[in-house]
């Protein structure tokens, strides 16, 4: 899981850096789409780190759940057992 998280973080950094470079280049050449690229850059500045945070949070939850299931399995319990059985 750590390897996946590192790769996701590197991809996010590359996306953010590439987006800023693209915005800078378009501003230098005075393109008609400069404002749209700037808005996309601002939007992505918020969304990409948020999505990375959600991805990391989900991987932690899944990893924690799989460890809990493994502990129950090796203790002789199934993860599908319910407390309402009588």
Image (cartoon, rainbow, N blue to C red):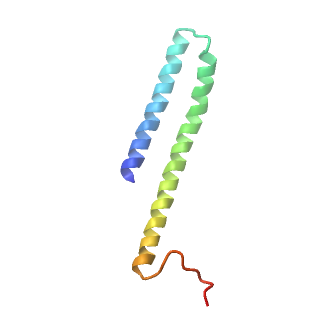
Using the image, determine if residue 12 lies above or below residue 83.
Answer: above
Q: Image point 51% across, 44% down: which residue?
A: 52
In which quadrant is the N terminus drawn?
Answer: bottom left
2 on left or right of 83:
left
Query: Does 63 sit above or below residue 23?
Result: below
Q: Nearer the viewer, residue 70 or 21?
A: 70
From the viewer's side, name the closer residue of 73 and 55.
Answer: 73
Residue shown at 55%/13% (left/top)?
27
Question: Which residue appears farthest toward the bottom when viewing the image?
Answer: 86
39 on left or right of 81: right
Viewer-proximal residue among 84 and 46? 84
Expressed as whole percent of the image width and height from the top left, the position of residue 59 reads: 47, 55
Q: Position of residue 79 (x, y in %)?
A: 50, 74
Q: Quadrant of the C terminus?
A: bottom right
Instruction: Kindly identify the residue that appears in the image at 51 percent across and 49 percent down.
Output: 55
Q: Is residue 23 above or below residue 4?
A: above
Q: Position of residue 38 (x, y in %)?
A: 60, 22
């Amino acid at each position: 899981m750590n390897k996946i998280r590192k790769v996701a973080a590197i991809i996010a950094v590359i996306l953010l850096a590439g987006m800023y470079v693209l915005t800078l280049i378009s501003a230098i050449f005075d393109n008609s789409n400069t404002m749209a690229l700037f808005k996309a850059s601002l939007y992505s500045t918020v969304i990409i780190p948020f999505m990375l945070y959600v991805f990391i949070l989900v991987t932690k939850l899944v990893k924690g759940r799989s460890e809990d299931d493994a502990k129950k399995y090796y203790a002789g319990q199934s993860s599908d057992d319910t407390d309402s059985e009588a």
